[in-house]
Amino acid sequence: MKKTLATILSAVLLFSVICVVPSADDGVTRVLACSDFQNPKGNEAGRAVVSAIVGAMQSAGVGSVDGFICCGDYDHDLTMLPGPTADGVNALSAAVDPIVKDGAPRVFVQGNHDSPSGTAGLASSGDNDPESGKYGVFVINEDDYSWFGGNREVARGTAENLKAYLNGKLEENFTAPVFVVSHVPLHYSYRSRRIGDEKYSRYIFNVLNEAGAKGLNIIFLFGHNHSNGWDDYLGGSSICLQKGDGINIARVGNTLKWDAFTLNFTYMNAGYTGYYDNHNGADDALTMTLFEITDTAVTVSRYAADGVHSLKSEGKRNGYHNEQGYAPDSDVQDSPLTIELTPVSDSSPMSPAPGVLTDFVMRIYELLKKLFSLFG
């Protein structure tokens, strides 16, 4: 009898313990992000990398996530055809299946090696907010803001669409984080100088910085710069800049000149999963990023296959391309980082036509330069 009673009491105690353990629905919304799935050895190799990172997260106690975002490039053979892009999207999606909840929103942003946006499993441009309303997602596809020089009018139109979306968030006093996700970054680098990337980023940056100044909690995620050490000066494969940090943004249409600005939003790479070329001794870890969202804060953690990784690593000068003109960002930011969510301080709409004045001034400047060059 005593043995039976002891068994019953043990069962009751065990049930009580189980009941107080936080369930999967613990009031925290989790979003997983990464970029550049393209692995030189193919989709199975890429899938193995992602599976290892997911396994490290699970070992750290992350049971499941409520949303998934990837910032582009899924085609390992670089053909930019629908078939390979879809194959890469499907391989990546399968790799995160063990941790992404069934039915959770998955946003696959178009990269510069991918099929047209809206095809092959890629997201449509613009508003991709989840039904839960726990966070916002605005997609900037490669078609909207492209590498290798880009297009002035397309970039300006993308900025206007983004402004309209963020004005809506301001009007409803949206306090949850808003993820603005793009394959191509905003910051100036020697890739801007040599290839022309980001020379129209100021249109988009102006909108984000104005919205951030009004109190929106914006997190900009990017990928793309995983070769030739373009981003080594900011931390290599692990970059995370916060509100109050400085950032270099190209003058409109200019690949040689940039200006320093102070960020009013969080700016970071989502985490490379395909490869990161190391030419300068910078961080080349392959990682994914976890965002844990409550009503008051976002906790950000970066994971590699061996566990928690730095959100931002020490910047290194790109000697491989003789980079000069700005100093490497030597700051380091460990995981996790907690970002306090702020209320909207000014819900009035943003000013129209971001960057038009800057654009006009730069056109006059370039014209005057040509005139002066003609007359010595």
Image: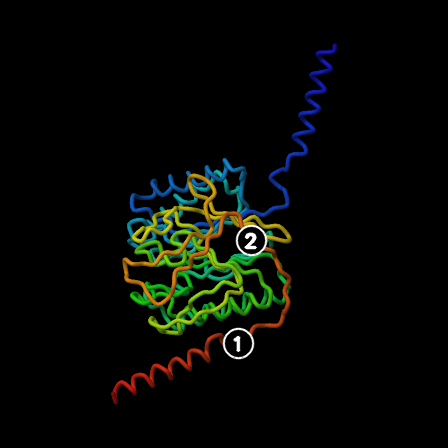
The disc labelled 1 sits on which kind of residue?
Answer: Pro
Identify the residue under disc 1: 352
Q: Nearer the viewer, residue 118 or 169?
A: 169
Q: How is the image coloured?
A: rainbow
Q: Nearer the viewer, residue 341 or 38?
A: 341
Q: Nearer the viewer, residue 331 or 114?
A: 331
Q: Which mark is residue 130?
A: 2
- Report the quarter where the C terminus lies: bottom left
Vertical placement of residue 106 versus 353, above or below: above
Vertical placement of residue 329 versus 260, above or below: above
Q: Residue furthest top?
A: 1
| Residue at figure coordinates x 64%, y 53% from the top left | 296
Q: How many marks?
A: 2
Local SS, label 1? loop
Alpha-carbon span between mark 1 and mark 2: 27 Å
Residue 338 point in image, percent of width and height: 57, 51
- Report the quarter where the N terminus lies: top right
Residue 291 point in image, percent of width and height: 53, 49
Q: Which mark is residue 363?
A: none
Is the residue marked by circle 1 packed among few (<14), some (14-19), or many (20+) residues within 10 Å?
A: few
| Residue at figure coordinates x 43%, y 44% from the top left | 93
Residue 24 point in image, percent of width and height: 60, 39
Q: Nearer the viewer, residue 325 or 182?
A: 325
Horizontal relation, residue 298 to residue 280: left or right: right
